[in-house]
Amino acid sequence: MTVGYREGQSFDATRQNWDGSGIRPLSWTVWYPAAKGAKAEVPTAASWFRQEPVARDAPIAVSERSQPLVLLSHGSGASASAMAWLAHRLAERGYVALAVDHHGHTGSERYRAEGFLCLWERAADLVALLDDPAWRRALGGTIDDRAHVAGFSAGGYTALQLVGARVAYSQFEPDNPVKSPVRGPREFPDLADQLPRLQANPVFRTSWARRRSDFSDPRFRSAVAIAPGRSVLGFDVESLAAMYRPVIVIGGDADDVAPPSECCDWLASHIEGSALEIITGGIGHYTFLPEGSKVGTQLSPDLFRDAAGVDRRAVHDEVAGRIADFLDSVR
């Protein structure tokens, strides 16, 4: 199946950007089943990622029923394009896969400590995007009003919040009884030290005060958490026990950033009925990023070079297939 591709810009008028100078931006990218006859080409723009052929701005395929929808959430410091490996394969299976750049927590703009600390705003991003008719008008066709949600690393945290997980403690707040072994992610290694100074930002204070709020939305039918990080250990266990929508947690057996024995296993033990799949064979955290381009591999080998014997493309095929099968079973 030919995969269509579009990009666009939306905004959430209910929230300010981190500077307080305007409303919150929602830059989105969507992959979808393209109409027959659409021509797919490999994008020529420079990228850190190996890019699959897509039909830019092609019409969406006509279907007798609504096209199923999946919203995607990237990991810390990444962007919507980091979910391309999954989005492209889901589109080939008939899904509309819609991803967003999470403001302040994305490599598509300047990093903001506020964005890295206030992970719950990411869930609100996907709710706002689901509300926004702009991308639907751009795409055309009939698309489900309800959606599945999938995310990698911090995106797994986002996905789980949308189906009922609530924050007991932010990972880096001083009162958190689960002490993190790091002071911040690779993109912001002193993140915990930023908390006191950020209190001067009224936009941050507003967000921080609502960190324990319920960010779930009944329109989300299921959640996929891929290599969820240690931030999930701050979820309220009672909220996890109360979750009733289907959840699958996927990890890599050699992940030393978000060890599955600490994160995936813990989630599965607290979410009744959830499925847990650990992919074996030396699968690291960043194996769940796209394949690197020549430039990307040279500039950041830690992100794009896997352990000996690991075929990242084959892993992506396997994982995306398992996720698509899971989503098919829900709908």
Image (cartoon, rainbow, N blue to C red):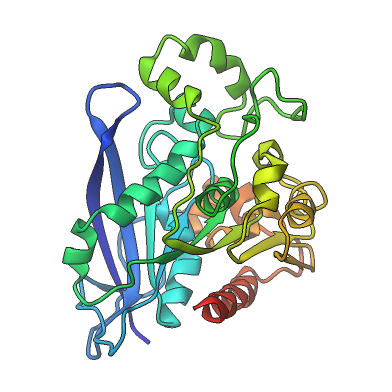
Percent x, y of residue 123:
45, 45
Viewer-nearest residue: 167 or 17: 167
Q: Position of residue 175 (x, y in %)?
A: 70, 19
User: Is residue 31 shown above or below 80?
Assistant: below
Which quarter of the rendered picture does the N terminus lie within? bottom left
Is residue 140 depicted above or below 256 in this figure? below
Left or right for 98, reference 141: right
Q: Quadrant of residue 143?
A: bottom left
Q: Is residue 77 visible?
A: yes
Residue shown at the point (58%, 79%) measured from the top left: 321
Q: What residue do we see at 38% from left, 66% from top? A: 146
Q: Position of residue 279 (x, y in %)?
A: 74, 68
Seen from the viewer's position, the closer of residues 217 and 155 is 217
Residue 103, placed above or below residue 9: above
Q: Residue at x 74, y 48 (%)?
A: 263
For the point 43% across and 49% down, the residue is 79
Left or right: where 95 falls relative to 155: left
Using the image as rendered, state which of residue 4 and residue 178 is in the foreground.
Answer: 178
Give percent across and percent down for residue 226: 62, 58
Specify whether residue 49 is in view.
Answer: no
